[in-house]
């Protein structure tokens, strides 16, 4: 069946840095990122860049899915194990992907003050 969805998002790294440096850092981090994402990003010297890339990835997936109602930030966890980044999904994100028979492919990039993510949704088995 081929490509079933495409999402692209960019995020300002300095915007995320301002949030991290401000009084709303903890509520923002708790609302948007899983514990595993926080542990990984928080120990990096370029934490704002890592958080921005994951924020862009989550936004890109939501766009690719057509913004399904009820989806939550923490339904989408960005992971990387030695290779390409990928999503570990739960909640509404997982339900929608399974109901539609989809798998997601994720690409992340950073340059200057921008982090970007592209998500391609494909029918499973294609």
Image (cartoon, grey):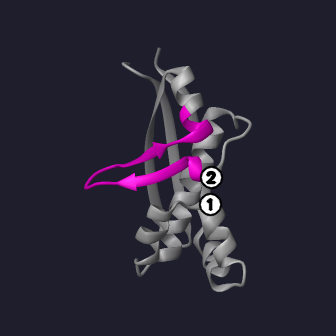
In the displayed orientation, state which residue is furthest to the top: 1
Q: Name which residue lies at 65% across and 40% down.
A: 63
For residue 88, which quarter of the picture?
Answer: top left
Q: Secondary structure at mark 2?
A: helix
Mark 2 packing: few (<14 Cα in 10 Å), some, or many (20+)? some
Answer left or right for 111 relative to 80.
right
Mark 1 packing: few (<14 Cα in 10 Å), some, or many (20+)? many
Q: Name which residue lies at 49% across and 64% down.
A: 35
Q: Name which residue lies at 62% across and 33% down.
A: 65
Magenta stretch bounds: 74-94
Please name whichever residue, 17 or 91, is drawn nearer the observer in this view of the structure.
Answer: 91
Q: Residue 11 magenta-drawn?
A: no
Q: CA distance from mark 1 to mark 2?
A: 5 Å
Residue 14, image x, y percentages? 62, 76
Q: Which residue is mark 1?
A: 32
Q: Which residue is mark 2?
A: 73
Residue 74, image x, y percentages? 58, 53
Answer left or right for 124 relative to 72.
left
> Which quarter of the figure is the C terminus placed in?
top left
Q: Residue 77 magenta-drawn?
A: yes
């Amino acid at each position: 069946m081929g490509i079933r969805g495409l999402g692209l998002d960019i995020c300002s790294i300095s915007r995320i840095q301002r949030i991290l440096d401000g009084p709303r850092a903890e509520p923002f981090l708790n609302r948007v990122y899983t514990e595993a994402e926080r542990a990984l990003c928080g120990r990096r010297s370029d934490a704002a860049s890592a958080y921005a890339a994951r924020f862009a990835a989550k936004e890109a997936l939501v766009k690719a899915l057509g913004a399904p109602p009820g989806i939550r930030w923490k339904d989408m966890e960005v992971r990387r194990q030695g290779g390409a980044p990928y999503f570990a999904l739960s909640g509404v994100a997982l339900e929608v992907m399974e109901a539609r028979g989809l798998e997601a492919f994720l690409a992340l990039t950073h340059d200057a003050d921008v982090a970007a993510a592209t998500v391609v949704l494909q029918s499973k088995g294609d």
